[in-house]
Amino acid sequence: MNPRPNTGNCSLHWFDQRLDHFTTLNATYKQRYFVYDKFWKRQADGHKEDGPIFFYCGNEADVTLYVNSTGLMWENAQALGALLVFAEHRYFGHSIPFGDQYKDHLQYLTHDQALADYALVLRSLQQQHRVDVPVIAFGGSYGGMLAAWFRIKYPATIRGAIAASAPIFANSIGYAEQFQGADYWQVVTHDASPEAGAAPNCIPNVRATWPLMFAKANSSRGLADLSALFQTCTPLHTRDDVEALALTLMMAWDTMAMGNFPFPSSYLTEGKATLPSFPVRAACEHLAPPFSLPNESTALLVAMKDATDIFTNATRDVACTVVHQEYDGIWDYMWCSQLLAQESYFDSNGVTDMFWPRNITFDTIATDCRAKWGVTPDPDWIRTAYGPADVLLASTSNIVFSNGGLDPWRAGGVLATSNPKITVVDIPEGAHHLDLMFSDPRDPASVTQARRTEIQQIRTWLHRDA
């Protein structure tokens, strides 16, 4: 399709979805989904058999983001005669139970309910069109986790799953042997290394920034200096304020690492602004000089501000730096209920990563979650629901797990398995689920090969019983 397909090519649908799939409560809400059927092969049109359904498991955002970005589905649907369906996750986008009062009813916001939503949408579609065709689930990040779990929990519904950048093990309590928070920040740091194409001085200069900032937290003059240098929206008064500012900068590096694509992209800003190609490299250019400390301390701090502004001021109209931020909105509730991965709570050590030592205990997390949402996390629920890593992987089939070498979420992903029915794809030059995106002339060879592998696996699944 030219121009690139998007929601304008699709038909919009609303499904009367059950609010609670696990009790007898009969309340419903309107769930949004998009459909594109022009490629769908139907027996009624003279084809040998009805084509499959390609189903995108909506993430924690407006589903239009995924409709407009998931090129792997669009670019291969015609050859495979597939119906494209993009479903929105409950409580996100326009699929909001209880309308403006949704925050008073977050007990229905769980990944288990979302999976049951998707199963019911698919059951309805199959009945509506009088077919019983294979369904391939697609998803990236949390959507990739959902795609994998969909295949695991509903194997009769889902023939196979493409789980891109799916950190199903990113829980340092339930899967402590597979993941610790510092592993995540180590990959962010890799993106700022010469091996990943960044300026050689970037990592040491980033590391040198934190002691300067925290030292200034010890005096009113230092706090005033930091407030001015980073143009904070409100003056910094305490060390906690400085810690919050440092976390804002850290999260900027995090987002640029996830979005370290070989082309300009607005995906990680949800369309609000365009990040440059390889934004971590661009940020590191500001930190390329060999700053001489302490004489050039101010210059180093200004360079850090300029580097992180590539994300924090991507729109180029941000007047000041917000210090105390809420990261990820109601996704934070999902972290607080089932410990679905949230990197702002991940530890860092300042040794294997370029940040500073942060040790966030479960007691701290629980206190924060009770204060914000009135819930205490269940740190072991995901492990209880799906089992230990080795058992989980040995007992399922027909899933491709892909991970990018530049994507920090690879730290919680499936990197190896002995199960021949699971395929693990490594994309050394790939950032966050680059393989799901539309193909681009600037794509590295590794992501082109990853897409070939994924489509070949789909072809195999479609021509083999589940």
Image: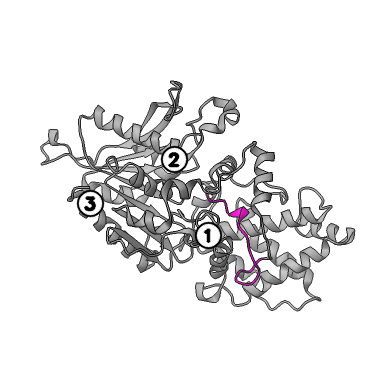
Q: Earlier in the sequence, mark 1 or mark 2?
A: 2
Which image quarter: residue 119? top left
Residue under label 1:
176
Q: Secondary structure at mark 3?
A: helix
- At mark 2, the secondary structure is helix
Q: Is residue 190 visible?
A: yes
Q: Which residue is mark 3?
A: 461
Left or right, 34 with reference to 264:
left
- Image position of 136 with respect to 219: above or below: above
Q: Is residue 286 above or below residue 174?
A: below
Which residue is farthest right?
Answer: 220
The Cα atoms of the two marked residues, 3 and 2, are separated by 28 Å
Mark 1 vs mark 3: which is more N-terminal? 1
Three-letter amino acid code at disc 3?
Trp
In the rendered image, residue 189, in percent from the top left (x then y), is placed at 58, 68
Does the magenta portion include 172?
no
In the drawing, what numbered circle is on residue 455? none
Characterize the local packing of mark 3: few (<14), some (14-19) or many (20 or more) Cα atoms within 10 angstroms.
some
Start-end of magenta stretch: 341-355
Name the amino acid, label 1.
Ala
> Which SS class for mark 1?
loop
The residue mark sitting in front, 3 or 2, is 3
Pick whichever, 455 or 149, lies toward us.
149
Q: CA distance from mark 1 to mark 2?
A: 35 Å
Q: Which residue is mark 2?
A: 64
Which is more N-terminal, label 2 or label 3? 2
